[in-house]
C-alpha cells in the first residue's frame, strides 16, 4: 500500500510540478493575491514591497552559491573522492544504500545544515556509482536529512535566543540551549526521526523495472603542461602558491576553533575552499573543478531574489503576522506549540528562512505563550520545527543539493511529499503529547 502511494505521488509530481523557477513565480503571485485579499493591501503598495525587498537576500544568495561551488570543489579533490568511494563501497543493496545516505545526511545536517546539504548530495552521487539504486530516491534521501537541521547545532532560532542582544530578549530573556536543542522533547523528535526517516526512505525503494539509474558525468581535467609552457602556465600548474594560501587559511580555521568559534555558513564555505585549494594542489586543477561546479548555480542566482520579494510582501503587508495570529487565537496553553508548528510550516512556504520566520512569528507567538502560560522554549522550537518540516515541499534549500546531484525538483519531490506527511505526523504528535 505504501509503495502504491509512493508511485502515485511520484507520477503526479512528475506530471504536474513545474520547474523550481515556475514554482517561485506561482508563489509570488499567491503571496500578492493573499495579501490583497486578506490585508487589502493596494496593488501598487504590494509592488513596492516586492521591488524593495527583491535584493534583500543577496548576501545569503552568494553564501548558498558558495555552498554549491566550494563543496563541489572539495569533492573533486583526489583524497575526498577516495574517501567517499570507500564509504560508498560499503553499500551492498539498494535499500542498504538508501538507509546509508539518509543517516549520513541526517548526521551532517544535525551538525550544520550547509555542510549537510553538500555532504548528502556528494555521498548520494558516490553511492550511485557503486549500487544499482534509484538515483531520484537516493537524492531525496540526502535531502531528507535536512529536516533535522533546525533541531540541531546550527538551528538559527535556538541559537538566536541563546545569544546576548537578540531582539526578543526584553520579553523572554536568554533561553539556554539546554531548554531548546537539548530539551527532552527536542531530543525525542530527533530520535524518532532518525529511526523513522531511514525506514520510510527504505520502504519507498522502487522495483528494478521502475529504477532510474545514475549516469556519472565525465570529470573535468586541466590540460597537461607542455614542455615549452609559458611562465603563466607554469604558475597555474605549480603547487607552491596554492600550498601557501591554503595552509594560511587552515591556520585561520584552527585559530577560530581554538578560540571557541563555531560553525556557520561562512566558516563552512571557507573550510571547504581552503581544503579544496590544498588538496587540489594546483590552481589549474581547482579551476577545472570550478568550471564544472558553477554550471549548477543558475537556479540559486535567479530564484533567491524572488523569495526575498515574497518575504517582503508577507512582512510588509502584515499577512505573516495575521496568519500567526489566527493560529494563536484558537490555542490553549497545551495546544499552542502544536498550532505554532502548523503555522510555521505554512509560513515557511513563503518565508523559507529560519531567522526571517522568527522575526515574523516571535512578536505574535511569544506574547500568546505568555498570556496562555505556555512553555516559551517549546513554542520557539515549534517555530523552528515548522520551518524545517515544510522544507520537504519548499525547494528553496534543495536548489544547491539538486545542482550538485544534477537533478530537477520534480525528480525528488514525489518522495519528499511522502516524507512531509510522515515527519509532520511525528513532530506534531510530540508537540501535542509530550
Image (cartoon, rainbow, N blue to C red):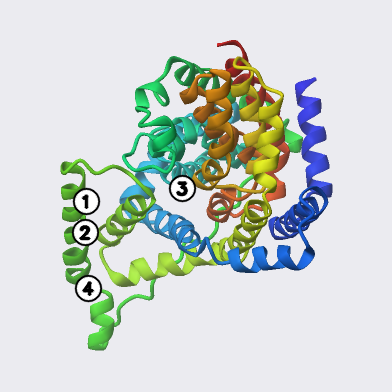
Query: Considering only vertical position in the picture, is 354 above or below 184?
Result: below
Residue drawn where x is 23% and y is 79% of the image = 235
- Mark 1–mark 4 Cα distance, whole angstroms, equals 24 Å
Circles 4 and 3 in contact, beta carbons < 8 Å? no
> Mark 4 falls on what kind of element?
loop
- Label 1 crowd bin: few (<14), some (14–19), many (20+), radius 10 Å: some
Query: Which callout, 1 or 4, points at the residue further toward the start of the chain?
Result: 4
Quadrant of the image occupied by residue 426: top right
Circles 1 and 2 in contact, beta carbons < 8 Å? yes
- Label 2 crowd bin: few (<14), some (14–19), many (20+), radius 10 Å: some
- Mark 3–mark 2 Cα distance, whole angstroms, equals 20 Å
Query: Which callout, 2 or 4, points at the residue further toward the start of the chain?
Result: 4
Q: How far across and down, in percent of the image, does residue 317 sit?
A: 68, 54
- Mark 2–mark 4 Cα distance, whole angstroms, equals 18 Å
Would residue 380 appear left or right of 202 to someone viewing this image?
Answer: left
Query: Considering only vertical position in the picture, is 33 above or below 323?
Result: below
From this viewpoint, is residue 92 visible?
Answer: no
> Mark 2 falls on what kind of element?
helix
Residue drawn where x is 59% and y is 23% of the image = 337
Residue matched to label 3 = 118
Residue matched to label 2 = 249
Query: Which callout, 4 or 3, points at the residue further toward the start of the chain?
Result: 3
Residue matched to label 4 = 238
- Mark 4–mark 3 Cα distance, whole angstroms, equals 28 Å
Circles 3 and 2 in contact, beta carbons < 8 Å? no
Residue 195 or residue 171, whichever sits in front: 171
Residue matched to label 1 = 253
Q: How many marks?
A: 4
Residue 368 or residue 404, whichever sits in front: 368
Q: Nearer the viewer, mark 1 or mark 3?
A: 1
Quadrant of the image occupied by residue 416: top right
- Mark 1–mark 3 Cα distance, whole angstroms, equals 19 Å
Amino acid at each position: 500500500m505504501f509503495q502504491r502511494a509512493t508511485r502515485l505521488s511520484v507520477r503526479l509530481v512528475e506530471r504536474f510540478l513545474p520547474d523550481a523557477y515556475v514554482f517561485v513565480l506561482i508563489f509570488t503571485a499567491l503571496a500578492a493575491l493573499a495579501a490583497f485579499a486578506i490585508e487589502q493591501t493596494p496593488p501598487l503598495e504590494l509592488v513596492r514591497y516586492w521591488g524593495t525587498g527583491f535584493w534583500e537576500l543577496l548576501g545569503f544568495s552568494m553564501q548558498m552559491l558558495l555552498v554549491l561551488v566550494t563543496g563541489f570543489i572539495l569533492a573533486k579533490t583526489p583524497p575526498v573522492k577516495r574517501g567517499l568511494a570507500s564509504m560508498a563501497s560499503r553499500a551492498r543493496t539498494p535499500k542498504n544504500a538508501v538507509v546509508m545516505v539518509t543517516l549520513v545526511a541526517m548526521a551532517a545536517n544535525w551538525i550544520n545544515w550547509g555542510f549537510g546539504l553538500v555532504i548528502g548530495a556528494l555521498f548520494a552521487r558516490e553511492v550511485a556509482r557503486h549500487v544499482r539504486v534509484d538515483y531520484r530516491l537516493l537524492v531525496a534521501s540526502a535531502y531528507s536529512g535536512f529536516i533535522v537541521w533546525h533541531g540541531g547545532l546550527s538551528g538559527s532560532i535556538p541559537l538566536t535566543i541563546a545569544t546576548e542582544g537578540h531582539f526578543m530578549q526584553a520579553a523572554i530573556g536568554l533561553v539556554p540551549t539546554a531548554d531548546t536543542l537539548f530539551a527532552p522533547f527536542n531530543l525525542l523528535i530527533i530520535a524518532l526521526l532518525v529511526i523513522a526517516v531511514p525506514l520510510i526512505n527504505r520502504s519507498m525503494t522502487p522495483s528494478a523495472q521502475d529504477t532510474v539509474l545514475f549516469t556519472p558525468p565525465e570529470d573535468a581535467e586541466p590540460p597537461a603542461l607542455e614542455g615549452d609552457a609559458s611562465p603563466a602556465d607554469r604558475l597555474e600548474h605549480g603547487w607552491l602558491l596554492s600550498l601557501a594560501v591554503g595552509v594560511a587559511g587552515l591556520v585561520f580555521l584552527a585559530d577560530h576553533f581554538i578560540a571557541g568559534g563555531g560553525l556557520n555558513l561562512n566558516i563552512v564555505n571557507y573550510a571547504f575552499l581552503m581544503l579544496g585549494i590544498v588538496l587540489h594542489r594546483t590552481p589549474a586543477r581547482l579551476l577545472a573543478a570550478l568550471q564544472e561546479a558553477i554550471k549548477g548555480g543558475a537556479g540559486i542566482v535567479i530564484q533567491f531574489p524572488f523569495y526575498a520579494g515574497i518575504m517582503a510582501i508577507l512582512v510588509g503587508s502584515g499577512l505573516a503576522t495575521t496568519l500567526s495570529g489566527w493560529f494563536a487565537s484558537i490555542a490553549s496553553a497545551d495546544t499552542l506549540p502544536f498550532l505554532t508548528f502548523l503555522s510555521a510550516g505554512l509560513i515557511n512556504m513563503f518565508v523559507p528562512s529560519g531567522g526571517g520566520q522568527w522575526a515574523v512569528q516571535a512578536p505574535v507567538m511569544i506574547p500568546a505563550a505568555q498570556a496562555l502560560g505556555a512553555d516559551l522554549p517549546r513554542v520557539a522550537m515549534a517555530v523552528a520545527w515548522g520551518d524545517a518540516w515544510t522544507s520537504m515541499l519548499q525547494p528553496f534549500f534543495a536548489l544547491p543539493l539538486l545542482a550538485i546531484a544534477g537533478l530537477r525538483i520534480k525528480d525528488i519531490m514525489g518522495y519528499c511529499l511522502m516524507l512531509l506527511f510522515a515527519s509532520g505526523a511525528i513532530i506534531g504528535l510530540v508537540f501535542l503529547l509530550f
